[in-house]
Image (spheres, rainbow, N blue to C red):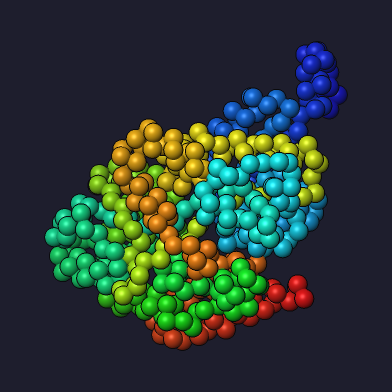
């Protein structure tokens, strides 16, 4: 310490004052890949250079569940990161934890430029609790070369469950050396398919008119989804890594041309485009296929937002918010969208991209963008809000996997509903 003090003294009084005044802002996020993690680091470097009194330090902290658990634990130990990227399914848990403060209460911020469905998702009890950052929805990815090889028209990707199954039958018959379909086993997709059918995942308007006390896993909508996967598996049309929530592994199966069709987040358009180029095939993107006979209602917002810790000095909270606003400004959200496929969360970013002719140059991005903007606002498409979100998603994923391993749809869903409803009851007992 004496050596550091001496060095600063030799550098002059300005350097010493800067070291004393500098506020460190830790930012925990979930992007371990160089592309997205590197983009965040670049924004932090720019911000730090322009604001010498603040030093933003981004750090990768694992997946969604790892990060929210680590953040809440650190906060309760008195060592919370100033900013945490919390996934949308953890919003109620983040709110209930009591370790964060509403961003709207830190200082006056104009939220009018944020896309309405996005900012509305994170507005709870009339307060904007967190700042939208990475927002996404699921889409269909497909290998145009393999479709042609199987005698399918790449200009007509499947838009329904039955359409996908019909294409799978042709792919199987063509013996092209690839399985028809693959995707990660993740509960968020189930919530999206229920929303597309106009069915809330939880009661009480998806937990938005009151705390959710039960899931709707005993609904026809849920059976439609699980029956689809049973049919895929029974016909050997489906491929995945055997793990739940393995987004990267499922992407690898697709980009290595082991499957023709793949469903994952819009946020993977950038990485999957790169993977397709490396593998030498042409990538296509289409809307999320939905159950037959269903009116397309739209998708549930995915991704995450930026939450700011409560028990930190005011100067640090303001510095954290300043960086969050910088990282999500008009120019940066347009850049983030181009790089990743996440939605640009600001209206001004959309205007900028349109002015540049971006959506003409990047039609793959336009499919996802239109899917979100065409979503019909309703409790179903607003998304599930519960503090037991991480547990209920895992229960759904385990039920999905059981169906893939031979359990009947009815048995798997009955068990899942019992377990998920119990998880809701246990969580809600904390707030009586």
- Can residue 370 be seen at all in this image of the molecule? yes
Q: Nearer the viewer, residue 263 or 130?
A: 130
Q: Which residue occupies 40% across, 57% down? A: 374
Residue 271 in the figure: left or right of residue 432: left
Q: Considering only vertical position in the picture, is 426 above or below 248?
A: below
Q: Which residue occupies 30% across, 68% down? A: 160
Quadrant of the rendered structure where residue 155 is?
Answer: bottom left
Q: Position of residue 270 (x, y in %)?
A: 39, 44
Q: Considering only vertical position in the picture, is 25 above or below 205?
A: above
Quadrant of the rendered structure where residue 404 is?
Answer: bottom left
- Can residue 66 be seen at all in this image of the molecule? no
Q: Position of residue 398 (x, y in %)?
A: 50, 74
Q: Considering only vertical position in the picture, is 305 above or below 228?
A: above
Q: Position of residue 153 (x, y in %)?
A: 17, 57
Residue 396 in the figure: left or right of residue 296: right
Image quadrant where one finds the C terminus: bottom right
Number of marks in picture: 0
Q: Which residue occupies 53% across, 84% down? A: 415
Q: Position of residue 127 (x, y in %)?
A: 68, 54
Q: Residue furthest right?
A: 2
Q: Nearer the viewer, residue 315 or 264?
A: 315
Q: Nearer the viewer, residue 102 or 94?
A: 102
Q: Which residue occupies 69% across, 77% down? A: 426
Image quadrant where one finds the N terminus: top right
């Amino acid at each position: 310490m004496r050596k550091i003090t001496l060095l600063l003294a030799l550098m002059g009084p300005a350097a010493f004052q800067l070291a004393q005044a500098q506020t460190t802002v830790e930012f925990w996020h979930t992007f371990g890949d160089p592309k997205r993690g590197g983009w965040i680091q670049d924004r932090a470097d720019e911000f730090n250079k322009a604001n010498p009194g603040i030093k933003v330090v981004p750090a990768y902290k694992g997946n969604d569940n790892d990060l929210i658990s680590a953040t809440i634990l650190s906060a309760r130990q008195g060592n919370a990161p100033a900013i945490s990227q919390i996934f949308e399914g953890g919003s109620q848990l983040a709110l209930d934890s009591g370790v964060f403060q509403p961003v709207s209460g830190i200082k006056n911020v104009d939220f009018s430029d944020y896309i309405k469905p996005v900012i509305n998702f994170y507005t709870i009890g009339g307060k904007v609790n967190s700042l939208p950052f990475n927002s996404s929805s699921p889409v269909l990815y497909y290998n145009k070369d393999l479709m042609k090889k199987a005698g399918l028209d790449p200009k007509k990707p499947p838009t329904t469950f039955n359409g996908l199954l019909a294409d799978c039958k042709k792919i199987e018959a063509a013996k092209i050396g690839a399985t028809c379909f693959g995707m990660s086993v993740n509960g968020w997709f189930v919530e999206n398919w229920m929303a597309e059918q106009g069915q809330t995942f939880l009661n009480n308007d998806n937990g938005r008119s009151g705390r959710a006390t039960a899931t709707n896993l005993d609904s026809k909508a849920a059976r439609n989804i699980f029956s689809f996967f049973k049919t895929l598996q029974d016909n050997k049309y489906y491929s995945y890594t055997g793990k739940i929530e393995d987004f990267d592994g499922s992407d690898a199966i697709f980009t290595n041309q082991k499957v023709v069709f793949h469903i994952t987040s819009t946020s993977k358009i950038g990485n999957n485009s790169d993977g397709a180029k490396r593998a030498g095939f042409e990538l296509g993107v289409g809307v999320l296929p939905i159950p037959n006979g269903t009116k397309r209602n739209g998708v549930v917002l995915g991704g995450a937002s930026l939450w700011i810790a409560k028990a930190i000095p005011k100067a640090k909270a303001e510095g954290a918010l300043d960086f969050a606003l910088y990282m999500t400004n008009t120019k940066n959200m347009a850049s983030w969208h181009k790089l990743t496929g996440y939605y640009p969360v600001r209206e001004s970013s959309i205007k900028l991209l349109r002015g540049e002719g971006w959506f003409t140059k990047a039609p793959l991005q336009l499919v996802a963008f239109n899917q979100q903007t065409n979503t019909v606002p309703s409790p179903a498409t607003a998304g599930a809000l519960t503090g037991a979100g991480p547990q209920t998603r895992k229960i759904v994923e385990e039920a999905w996997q059981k169906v893939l391993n031979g359990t009947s749809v009815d048995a798997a869903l009955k068990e899942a509903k019992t377990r998920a409803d119990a998880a809701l009851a246990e969580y809600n007992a904390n707030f009586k």
